[in-house]
Amino acid sequence: MSTRDLTASPGASDPAGANRSGQKAGASRRPGQRRIGKVLLGLLAWIIGILFVSPLLWMLVTSLHAETDASTNPPSFFAPLTLDSYANFFGGSSGANPWPFLINSAVAAIVSTLIVLVLSTLAAYALAIRRIKRWSDVLFFLLSTKMLPMVAGLLPVYLVAQMFGILDTWLLLIIIYSAMNMPIAVWMMRSFLAEVPVEVLEAAELDGARLPRVFMKILLPLTAPGLAATALICFIFSWNELLFANVLTSTAASTAPVFLTSFVTSQGLFLSQVCAASLIISVPVLVAGIAAQDKLVQGLSMGAVK
Amino acid sequence: MLPALIFVILVTQIPFAITIVISFMKWNAAYPDDISFGTVANYVTVFTDADLLRAVFVTVGLTVSVVLVSAVLGLAIALLLDRKFIGRGLVRTLMITPFLIVPVAAALLFKHAIFNPSYGLVNGLLTTVFGENAPQPDLMSTYPLLGIGIVLVWQWTPFMMLIMLAGLQSRPLDVYEAALVDGAGPGQTFRFITLPHLRRYIELAALLGTIYIVQNFDTVFTMTSGGLGTANLPYVIYQEFFVAQDYGVASAVGVIVVIASLIIATFALRTASTLLKEENS
């Protein structure tokens, strides 16, 4: 039985390991039963997936309804669609103009991500390739900083920023977000650089290539996908951040999540508008996250899981 | 390497040191002339104030229940997604989208469009199904913590699922083949091979989830603004600092949160280091 089962088992014919579960379905059951079970479990996965995404679909539908159709009970699923709420959002007809907030978020997230990429790649080079002394201690120190709640450092950051007169500026947000994402980025970049074959680097060294050249010609091309994933994850965390943005900015540098908090206590006909605003502000994160989904897990687990 | 390290120390570690100093100070921004050092009064306040103590319980309760529920759900869904079926990649993408919504936006969506007692989706659907006399619960007034918990589970289950799925897909194939040869059933295979292999991934997912959820501020701030007994420790720090402007008490709470996080982090670091060692061996 062993030979037949082994060759028939999907795992053996699928080295990528995409499906190992066929084996678990048990050799004792009849094939027909097995197929029905498989179809049902696939169906169940679909149902759960749709269930999880349904609040988002409701957000989308509500944002496309007129305010009067958005807040009915029972819900009017099939009310006519309109882009009014999006027009209102960008027209700023019911409050603040969202553009400054979106621009502040974009600047803080993009600039901090660039800084993090440069510094973390250099640090990761020292940790993964140069293997400086006590490299794993450094790594774990960085990881431990990520595990301390940032909120505990909020007050000193506020006081020091006040002292330097940089409250409510891009500079302050960029500094905070860079420090916030640095440990994750170092961990991720280290694991990507560690995959570069040593032989390639040795060959380059024999040819007399200097460090900048090694970076440009070998390391960056080889780790480009990892670099991109790291960038996207740093971007997501910076874009989402609320606590520091809320406390450290007031008018000039307020970010998109701070803009959203103006809806916290809203009353009356605003449901469609709040959904439109939430959706638009989430779009950059959705795009970045889906683009980086294969490496997402590595970033979220700080490189501990591949 | 040094620039990154120095930068991280400057921006993340120095503030903690200052927080410890301030926690022993009498300092309320409303009384700028009355600042002094060398008091444990802030800690006495933290441990005797009923609201602050409540925040400790809220934080622990919320974190533990959200982590447990989302880890179990995440594991179950990861097991489903580990099988081959039509549209598997698409379902995986659908599953992770809740995690990719700005937390404030997710909280606003649930607060206003889903849980609102008069026009939210939940009560709306109840009316659709049961007609005029359908029950119309007001979740955010009666069980506000449950409401916050649901949003957090919705957002964090995908995170748990992703880590568990990575764990499932790193299982060594040959062990399963051997088990099959030995005639092990699906239950036995799961109990004696899959679970032990997944153990460290489950631990890591739970610990990282704990670290992120203990720090949660956005959801509490957005859904209840800390009202109705839902204030957790990060929210209390924010409130003491930003609203009450009692810098001393805010810092003392901060120190306590840091100590609690350090304890959890020690376990998380140990798990991460086993995974790192395996990778290098």
Image (cartoon, coloured by chain):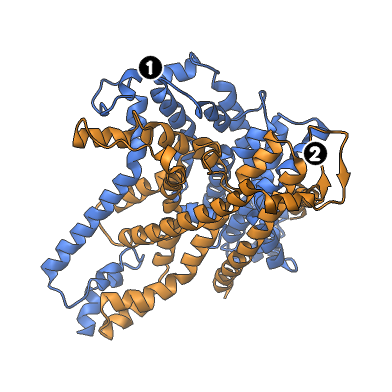
Chain colours: A blue, B orange
Q: Nearer the viewer, residue A152 or A193?
A: A152
Q: Is residue B51 left or right of residue A9?
A: right
Residue at point 60%, 59% (across, down): A193
Question: From the viewer's perspective, is residue B239 above or below residue A183?
Answer: above
Labels 1 and 2: the sequence-earlier one: 1
Question: From the viewer's perspective, is residue A87 above or below residue B251?
Answer: above
- Label 1 sits on what residue type? Asp
Rendering coords of residue A66 (x, y %): 33, 19
Q: Which mark is residue A40?
A: none
Rendering coords of residue A285 (x, y %): 49, 39
Residue at point 35%, 76% (across, down): B191
Q: Quadrant of the N terminus of chain A?
A: bottom left
Rendering coords of residue B157 (x, y %): 42, 53
Q: Are marks 1 and 2 on the same chain?
A: yes
Mark 1 vs mark 2, foreground winner is: 2
The picture quadrant where one finds residue A148 is bottom right
Q: Is residue B24 left or right of residue A279?
A: right
Q: Nearer the viewer, residue A207 or A124?
A: A124
The picture quadrant where one finds residue B131 is top left
Residue at point 43%, 35% (across, down): B111
Q: Nearer the viewer, residue A267 or A257?
A: A267
- Label 2 sits on what residue type? Val
Circle 1: element type:
helix
Q: Is residue B110 left or right of residue B102?
A: left
Asked if residue A214 shows in the view, the reply is no
Find the distance from the CA under tag 1 to the CA under tag 2: 44 Å
- The residue at which mark 2 appears reads as A160
- The residue at which mark 1 appears reads as A84
